[in-house]
Image (cartoon, grey):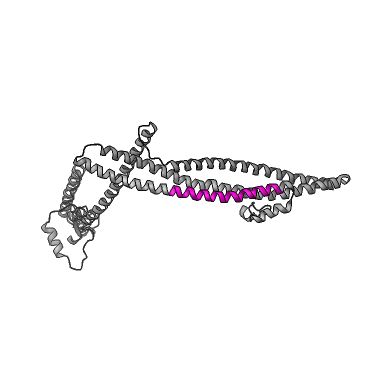
């Protein structure tokens, strides 16, 4: 009995905590009090963070488990210093950082990008200057264009209202007017020739269909076989000769189209450039005359010299284009005579041979002008192209 009481008393004297470790009650009270103090400190820090934000200078990051050594603690002030350096913010040197840098071994490489801000700022200066130079150049181009447009518009209005003078080359102006009238007449010939081609093509197709019908009826009507046969052969012959004549007319139309819409149009384009140069020349000439009649001070003399330089530039351009127009009109007239002589002879011989019923002469005309007829169905795409 006494032994059991002693063992029960011994048992009651040994405290057991929640982890199964045997510690004294004094130690439990000490740990509990330390935990409360730590919790109160954490609660105060949390309230401070929520009110004024975290103070990175007083916090630290622990790299390790609970109870680790002090070597794993990294102060966040060093991280803040690195961030501010990367953003280009100057940081006052501290003794702690100097000691930490001095304690590092020499084989640790330096952090790249510490001078990145200065390099980027220095490299951005030439880029800004280049973009500014391009903008200034574009502005100068727009300014010159606007000034030139204003002068030409003013000269054009003054000419239309009879207040300004214009440079006139009577001989060249007459040649230009003749060329424009000739182009209008040739366009009319081209329009009529195309209409003739379309109508004649329809007639040839009708003759071809009529010949097929006569041939079919000659097979189905024994009592009129010979009559239908004669008419079918006649229509087939007319259709063949009509296709030959169509080849000649198409060649005629193609040549006239090239003469009107390419050769003459190219000359008229040069004439348009010449007329624009003439207008610019007269505009700068009027400007120079106006400055010449004004006072002769230092500012006016500078403007007068600049206007005289522009006048000379546009005068040279006007004379060059006038020479080009004269040469092109001369060559165009020679080319027109050669082309039309050949095409009119072809058209006459082909039409005469067709309506005379002379098939040999019609074929000889095409050989004379090196015209090759396309076989039937040549314009249609092949089955492979259709796929």
Depth check: give the residue in front, 1 or 142: 142
Residue 336 sits inside the magenta stretch: yes
Residue 22 sits inside the magenta stretch: no
Give the answer, above or below, for where 147 lies relative to 340. Answer: above
Give the image location of residue 356, x and y in percent.
74, 47
* Residue farthest to the bottom, as pictured: 107
| Residue 146 visible somewhere in the drawing | no
Examine the image and state in which quarter residue 184 appears.
top right
Residue 180 as seen in the image, left or right of residue 44: right
Residue 205 as seen in the image, left or right of residue 47: right
- Which quadrant of the rendered structure holds the N terminus? bottom left
Give the image location of residue 384, x and y in percent.
63, 56
Magenta span main SS: helix
| Region of the chain picked out in magenta, as a range | 324-353
| Residue 50 visible somewhere in the drawing | yes
Depth check: give the residue in front, 27 or 120: 120
Residue at horizontal 60%, vertical 47%?
253
Give the image location of residue 15, x and y in percent.
20, 55
Residue 205 as seen in the image, left or right of residue 78: right
Give the image location of residue 39, x and y in percent.
19, 48
Give the answer, above or below, for where 75 lies relative to 351. Answer: below
């Amino acid at each position: 009995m006494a032994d059991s009481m002693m063992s029960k008393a011994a048992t009651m004297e040994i405290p057991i905590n929640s982890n199964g470790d045997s510690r004294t009650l004094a130690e439990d009270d000490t740990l509990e009090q330390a935990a409360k103090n730590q919790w109160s400190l954490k609660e105060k820090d949390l309230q401070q963070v929520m009110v004024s934000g975290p103070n990175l200078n007083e916090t630290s990051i622990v790299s390790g488990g609970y109870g680790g050594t002090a070597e794993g603690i990294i102060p966040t002030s060093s991280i803040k210093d690195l961030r501010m350096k990367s953003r280009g913010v100057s940081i006052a040197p501290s003794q702690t950082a100097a000691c930490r840098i001095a304690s590092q071994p020499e084989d640790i490489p330096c952090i790249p990008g510490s001078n990145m801000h200065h390099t980027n700022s220095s490299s951005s200066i030439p880029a800004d200057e280049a973009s500014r130079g391009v903008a200034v150049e574009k502005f100068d181009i727009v300014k010159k264009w606007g000034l030139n447009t204003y002068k030409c518009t003013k000269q054009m209005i003054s000419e239309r209202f009879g207040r300004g003078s214009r440079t006139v080359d009577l001989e060249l102006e007459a040649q230009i007017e003749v060329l424009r009238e000739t182009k209008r007449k040739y366009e009319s010939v081209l329009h009529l020739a195309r209409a003739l081609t379309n109508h004649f093509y329809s007639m040839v197709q009708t003759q071809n269909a009529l010949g097929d019908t006569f041939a079919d009826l000659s097979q189905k009507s024994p009592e009129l076989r010979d009559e239908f046969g004669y008419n079918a052969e006649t229509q087939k012959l007319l259709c063949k000769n009509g296709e030959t004549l169509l080849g000649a007319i198409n060649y005629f139309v193609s040549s006239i189209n090239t003469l009107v819409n390419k050769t003459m149009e190219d000359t008229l384009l040069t004439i348009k450039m010449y007329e624009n140069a003439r207008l610019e020349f007269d505009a700068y000439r009027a400007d120079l005359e106006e400055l010449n009649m004004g006072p002769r001070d230092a500012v006016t003399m500078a403007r007068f010299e600049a206007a005289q330089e522009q006048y000379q530039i546009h005068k040279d351009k006007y004379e060059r284009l006038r020479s080009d127009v004269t040469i092109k009109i001369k060559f165009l007239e020679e080319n027109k005579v050669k082309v039309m002589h050949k095409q009119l002879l072809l058209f006459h011989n082909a039409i005469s041979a067709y309506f005379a019923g002379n098939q040999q002469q019609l074929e000889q005309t095409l050989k004379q002008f090196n015209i090759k007829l396309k076989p039937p169905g040549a314009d249609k795409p092949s089955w492979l192209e259709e796929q």
